[in-house]
Amino acid sequence: RLGQITEMIHTASLIHDDVLDEAETRRGSDAVHKLFSNKVAVLAGDFLLARASVLLARLGNVEVVEVMATALDALVTGEVMQAKAQPTDLESFDWYVRKSYFKTASLIACSCKSAALLSGYGQESEEVIAAEKFGYHLGLAFQIVDDLLDFTQSADLLGKPALSDLKNGHATAPILYAAEEYPEMGPLIRRRFKDKGDVQTAHKLLKQSSGLEKTRELALWHASQAVEWLSSFPDTPANQALVRLTTQVITRIK
């Protein structure tokens, strides 16, 4: 049931995210708000969150309810951070990582922590801490790879327009790394790539830089940290499956 709850929260966040970003497509199909309207999309996301809350309460574990409620809090915090970001925030790698945690990794980390709690481990136990840390690093690896694919894969493969982050004004890891080599990227980031030719210029500077390579290295580092935290658990088939999952996260092409 925890898996169902997590998927419902995740789906709701995607529906709401597409409304906020005015995204046309999601995974190769029309976004919900394009099919039905913004109002229906917002209500659909709210309904999923409401149903997830009901199922969460039925788990009968107050600690897990608190942890998963924290994940909901983090998801909204991430969206608010993105909406209210100051130009200087957009250039900060620390800000990017925090936003990525709130918007993506928090749900994975909280779900993993909740799974450990439901397995009977105590709140301060090594296993619960390790489960949360695994989810934290897995979630960041996933988001960093997602940001990388936006520059390396075609729109058909991604199921969404290529360079969508740039077009939406988002400076992700590849661009931030490129900005360390090309200071002229700074003004583009601060104005959210809004001027004519900004997207093309940023993409050109990125290709001239080591931004993509450094982003891959960062994703690999987080993946290795995730696997390291798994060593706190017995070497069981379930543990091995999580190691394989981590590998799939960093080798995926869409």
Image (cartoon, rainbow, N blue to C red):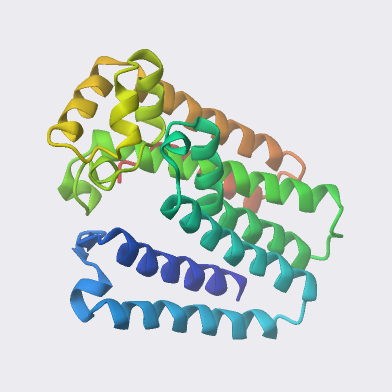
- Where does the image place residue 195, in percent across and percent down from the top left? 18, 37
Q: Answer above or below: position of 230 versus 187.
A: below
Judging depth in this view, the residue of 204 and 133 nearest the camera is: 204
Judging depth in this view, the residue of 188 and 25 nearest the camera is: 188
- Where does the image place residue 210, in percent across and percent down from the top left? 35, 16
The N terminus sits in image quarter = bottom right
Q: Is residue 139 visible?
A: no
Query: In the rendered image, which quarter is residue 18 located in?
Result: bottom left
Q: Answer above or below: position of 83 versus 152.
A: below
In this picture, residue 249 sits left or right of residue 135: left
Q: Answer above or below: position of 206 versus 66.
A: above
The residue sitting at 42% across, 69% down in the picture is 11
- Where does the image place residue 209, in percent across and percent down from the top left? 30, 16
In this picture, residue 108 sits left or right of residue 249: right
The residue sitting at 69% across, 50% down in the picture is 132
In this picture, residue 223 sits left or right of residue 181: right
Q: Answer above or below: position of 224 versus 162.
A: above
Judging depth in this view, the residue of 129 and 75 nearest the camera is: 75
